[in-house]
Image (tube, helix red, strand yellow):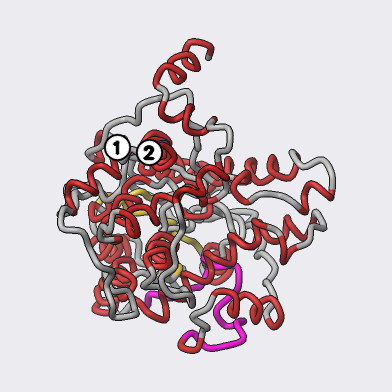
Amino acid sequence: MSEKIILVWFRNDLRVHDNEILLEAIRKADKVLPVYCFDPHYFQTTEAGNHKTGNIRARFLIESVANLRQNLRNLGGELVIAHGHPAELIPQLAEQYHISEVYHHREVAFEETGISEQVEAALWKMKLNLKHFIGHTLYHKEDLPFPIKDIPDSFNTFKKKVERDSAVRPCVQTPEAVMTPEIIDAGEVPTLEQLGLNEPIADPRAYRFVGGETMALQQLEQYFANKSTAATLKKGSSAASKLSPWLALGCLSPRQVYWELVKHEVSINSHPLMLELLWRDYFRFMFKKYSSKFYSPAGFKDNAPELATNQDELFDQWKNGQTGVPYVDACMHELKITGFLHNSCRQVVAAYLTKTLKVDWTRGAQWFEEKLIDYSPASNWGNWAYIAGVGNDPRENRYFNPKTAAELDPKGEYVRLWLNEEAAGDLAASA
């Protein structure tokens, strides 16, 4: 009798801890074949002339995939790294390694689900099954107090019902060992140059995010180690955690973060980090409910915002940090240099683009897609639609006044840091 081999297709779940598909494959099969595909779709140039994936996020991805390979090797396994379209590569590998079944985590955005459907159709022709798992959210879909189609459009209603009626499942255990078939060619981790991108410019003002599960768990540990008292923890800041890039690529499990909060006996429901996890869940479930409507200028309200006539000129001023509004410009410079922005900054610049400049909000969402190191489709497009007033906001004509930036930066320190090139030079000299 031939051995059973399951192919585990990694996408945005680049970890070995709390990874149900990996653990389930190990339990059900004699051997597993872990695979990651660098899909050229994500490294193309868009119609607007932007990179779909910018160099800062691409570097973080490369590091994360390399770390996943190392962690699998530490367990006795290996990660096959392939380059090309998954709908072509996965069936080829399935045939080459006599695969019995393919496992993967289900996505929600239409591009990602479209790729899954292509893979599923190709495998179906080979009489192979693509098994879907749910592993990107804090709350499992089946544990929600309502079906997806009835999820409240109000976040506050969603939050109250979930906190009252749902429970977070325990993390699944980390495998003790991974057995793979004899691998002929495991492939190489690409360089940025091979992906058509340049190395990011080093800047002493930029926090250096390093991709991978190992760094993610270290960052989580450091976040709690830096909080010396329970009182400080209760006032903890999700922004200070800087966990979102690792959460976006699945280097860190949302449940792992939750149970760390429980372990440290913080007030769960009022903690900013818990709020961040709930917003992530909410937008993913909203994408399941409304699908591609989130990509339409009219959102799911069938009423696109009024637009200015000189769209290109205004958008270029905004993206280049040349609006003349210091706080907005400082935020845009930080985004370009670091790939990261505090959520308050994101709200300010999004509101300014859509409400003051009256530029199509989808252009801003596309710019964030390229630049953000923690980009994920549901959170990015969901938040932009929310700010633009065409998404999940029960209040009509919502407006975040960019003048409130004075409250965010009362001494002007943030503006001076990101708009003063001499300050950046001084930092470089002292480094």
Please tell me which residue lies in front, 87 or 348: 348
The reply, left or right, for residue 243 in relation to residue 111 is right
Q: Residue at x 40, y 59 (%)?
A: 380
For the residue labelled by badge 2, is the local secondary structure a helix, a strand or a loop?
helix
Q: Which quadrant does the N terminus fall into?
A: bottom left
Q: Amino acid at mark 1?
A: Gln
Q: Is residue 146 magenta?
A: yes
Please tell me which residue lies in front, 253 or 386: 386
Which segment is the magenta one? 129-148
User: Does residue 240 appear in this view?
Assistant: yes
Q: Earlier in the sequence, mark 2 or mark 1?
A: 1
Label 1 belongs to which residue? 322
Residue projecting furthest to the top: 429
Quadrant in the rendering for residue 263: bottom right
The reply, left or right, for residue 71 in relation to residue 391 is right
The reply, left or right, for residue 267 in relation to residue 363 is right
| Circle number at residue 329 | 2
Q: Is residue 165 above or below residue 382?
A: below
Query: Do the CB atoms of the residues marked 2 and 1 lie less than 8 Å apart?
Result: yes
Predominant secondary structure in magenta? loop
Q: Amino acid at mark 2?
A: Asp
